[in-house]
Amino acid sequence: MELPVLPRVPLACLPTPVEPLRRLLPALLPGAAGLPELLCKRDDLTSAPLSGNKVRKLELLLGEALAQGADTVITCGGVQSNHCRATALAAARLGLGSVLLLRTADPARPPALQGNLLLDRLAGAELRFITPAAYRERAALLEQTAGELRAAGRRPYVIPEGGSNALGSLGYALAVQELAGQLGEPWTRRPLTLCHATGSGGTGAGLLLGVAALGLPWRVAGFNVCDDRAYFVRVMGVILDDAARRFHLPAAAALSERRDAFDVRDGYVGRGYALSRPEELALLAEACRLEGLVLDPVYTGKALFGLVAELKQDPAALGEAVVFFHTGGIFGLFDEDKALALAGLL
Ligand SMILES: *Cc1c(COP(=O)(O)O)cnc(C)c1O
């Protein structure tokens, strides 16, 4: 089955490389027999500083925004949101304005301009800080903000949290197509497992859809960095239902029928979203030392921590070969110097 052809603004440097990680698992799990072959899909290299997984979603979302004649995009996220930073930079690149609703403990005392937030400001985004309580009503708040802008004569386009709706997630269905083309035979006949960090569900839904639509014998395993498995099964189900309706994709409808089979590996949220444990940071440091691979503490570091923990229990837990999607997030690391020092890693 074909994936739909939709307006897409070229923002990402594609294809992103696929690289073997040969030293990591043997060093972390010495003596373990039957470890999988490990490859890394370098979606941290979609561009720089417009990096990470949100860029693939934004190619489609901003394609639609431009087609609709929008002049401003509105989105939301945590204060160090990679998605908001990518949106602000992509909007600037296309000559659009951006309004970001950013969750922070005390909006009256906004955090220092560091990491992603620094780039949001440099890109000229309008920053609106909101409380965690207000953030729970984010969908309504985004619409309300759009109403305000419309009343002021602007033409807003709303992008949901993480760019994770049906349209955005198709960016990851296309990423599966890209990966299959890069790997070719015999990989496209092997039982690969695509591993990734799950934060708002769009990447996972898109990967599932890509694998199903292309009829590949691959599995998708997400490691959630917030909420829980039940939450993401529901969220991905909704995204796939919307994709089925909007783009007439039987594969998406069929997947949504099998929600019980969504592979979300719960148990690695740790201290909570964007909060790190010393053992997670230690793994991040090891990956950097062993492979020159720079992970982020919020998403990819936790996902790799989960992946290694699962393999420690059972080297066959993820099949014979794994492609780990490095989904970016590097700027979040530059906020973690104190935690890294505390953990004795610097
Ligand atoms: C947003 C993000 C994710 C999670 O992707 P979702 O599609 O929101 O589940 C993973 N890694 C990084 C670095 C991210 O910024």
Image (tube, rainbow, N blue to C red):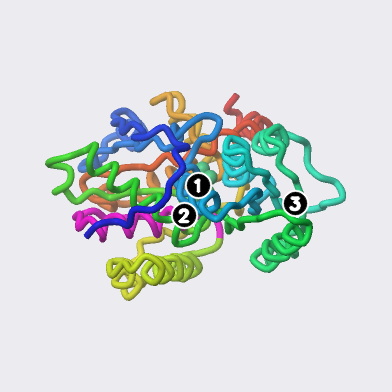
The percent position of residue 265, horizontal first and vertical second, equals 41, 58
> Is the CB atom of the residue marked by disc 1 within 8 angstroms of ligand 1's nearest atom?
no
The reply to whether dot 2 and dot 1 touch (C-beta < 8 Å) is yes
Which residue is identified by label 1? 58
The reply to whether dot 3 and dot 1 touch (C-beta < 8 Å) is no
Check the image and report above or below for 85 versus 20: below
* Whole-number angstrom distance, CA of label 2 to CA of label 1: 7 Å
Upstream in sequence: badge 2 or badge 1: 1
Please tell me whether residue 257 belongs to the stretch shown in magenta: no
Answer with left or right where residue 208 lies relative to residue 272.
left
> Is the CB atom of the residue marked by disc 2 within 8 angstroms of ligand 1's nearest atom?
yes
* Whole-number angstrom distance, CA of label 3 to CA of label 1: 24 Å
Q: Residues within 10 Å of mark 1 (few under 14, many from 20)?
A: many
> At 71% across and 51% down in the image, what residue appears?
102
Q: Amino acid at mark 1?
A: Leu
The percent position of residue 242, horizontal first and vertical second, equals 43, 69
Q: Amino acid at mark 3?
A: Thr
> Could you say whether the residue bearing mark 2 is in a helix, strand or loop?
helix
Upstream in sequence: badge 3 or badge 2: 3
Viewer-proximal residue, 315 or 126?
126
> Is the CB atom of the residue marked by disc 3 within 8 angstroms of ligand 1's nearest atom?
no
> Could you say whether the residue bearing mark 1 is in a helix, strand or loop?
helix
The percent position of residue 33, horizontal first and vertical second, equals 21, 41
Which residue is identified by label 2? 168
Answer with left or right where residue 44 lies relative to residue 132.
left
Quarter assignment of residue 28: top left
Q: Residues within 10 Å of mark 2 (few under 14, many from 20)?
A: many
Region in magenta: 202-226
* Whole-number angstrom distance, CA of label 3 to CA of label 2: 25 Å
